[in-house]
Image: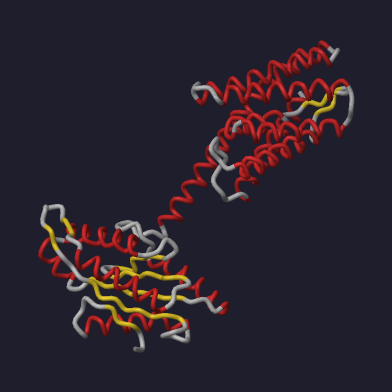
Amino acid sequence: MIIVKQLFANLAILVALLFLYTQIKKDPPLRMNSTIKKKITTGVAGGLFSNILMQYSIPIGTTLIDLRHIPIILLAYFGGAVPAFIGMFLVIAGRFLIGINISSYTSSLLMLTVTLFAIGISRTNLSQQTKKWSMLTFANLLTSLLFFYLIEDQQLLLYLIPGYWFVSFLSGYVAFQVLHILFKSQMMFDKYKAESTIDPLTGLNNVRKFDEVFNSCMADLEKKKKLSLLYIDIDFFKKINDTYGHSEGDVVLKDLGLILRSCARPTDIVSRNGGEEFTVLLVDSSLDQAKKIAERIRSTVEEHAFLLNSGTEVNITVSIGLSNFPETTPNGNLMIKDADKALYEAKRTGRNKVCTANQ
């Protein structure tokens, strides 16, 4: 009975380690298609977890009873061969550091066999549940054979093996469930985090993301980098909504978002700041470069026929205000204000044009 209680303590330690790891590592969970770097770091973590479990083993003669195989099975199931082998080698090395005897040799052979089997099963087309239970059952069978070989006390084996099977299956089930729940929670968190910075209609950055990036750029201005900002507004957009309806207006906004992306550079930050107002933040861009991009946007929009859901084609124009650090705006903190003033000037002087701040 004491042995079963100690195995449950092993289970509690395992769950705590898994939870701690997923909270520290905020990157995506381990997958078969994860990067090699991800597989290596996770494999090392799994091997360390197994070694920690061995520190809380139940010694019976020279034999150590614990749940060290569970992290290796998890590595094989989620990540395949690379993390599983890394974890396995660390487990074997840790076992020999504890002591070199017949038990360490046989347990190392057991870990190798369990790892190879788990990797093989992970590559099959079996269902997820079948893979999990096959890995755990195989590990328990080999462990039981090891007990028969190393433990001479038959009375002890009568309750040790059933108790070990029960706790091992329970531990495997709990470990898989904990990871699935934690991975799902992490993915949901990442999804909500991404959605909080993306405009749902156009897929562009929203004003919150724009503010975040702009403030970051402000911190880099001390390095004397060039920075340009385009403020873009659709001319007479209210007429589109009043004439065709807001749903058709949304079509125009979506298409305009695509045009802005196509005209901007891959490194530029394109955002919808609200309503029919958009911005393009051009990192490391001179004033002349920004003017060319702004004019390309203006002319592309003017020449583009926006196809509405009703089949009607409409044409629109945009007005653009431009500011640049340091050529138009020596004080970077005034770039938004200057670009907005330039946009107002473009609106005031006829629309469908690009106006540069302070010129």
Placement of the N terminus among the 4 image quadrants: top right
Q: Nearer the viewer, residue 165 or 43?
A: 43
Residue that appears at 23% across and 66% down: 301
Q: Is residue 34 left or right of residue 192?
A: right
Q: Is residue 359 left or right of residue 131?
A: left
Residue that appears at 81% across and 34% down: 94
Residue that appears at 32% across and 79% down: 321
Q: Number of labelled discs?
A: 0
Q: How is the image coloured?
A: secondary structure
Residue that appears at 70% across and 16% down: 162
Q: Position of residue 166 (x, y in %)?
A: 66, 21
Q: Nearer the viewer, residue 351 or 197?
A: 351
Q: Is residue 80 left or right of residue 278?
A: right
Outermost residue on the top side: it is: 154
- From this view, report whether residue 165 is shown above or below residue 186: above
- From this view, report whether residue 8 is shown above or below residue 281: above
Q: Is residue 13 left or right of residue 312?
A: right
Placement of the C terminus among the 4 image quadrants: bottom left
Q: Position of residue 55 (x, y in %)?
A: 80, 36
Outermost residue on the bottom side: it is: 359
- From this view, report whether residue 349 is shown above or below residue 177: below
Q: Position of residue 167 (x, y in %)?
A: 67, 25
User: Which of the 4 image quarters holds residue 201?
Assistant: bottom left
User: Which of the 4 image quarters holds residue 132?
Assistant: top right
User: Which of the 4 image quarters holds residue 74?
Assistant: top right
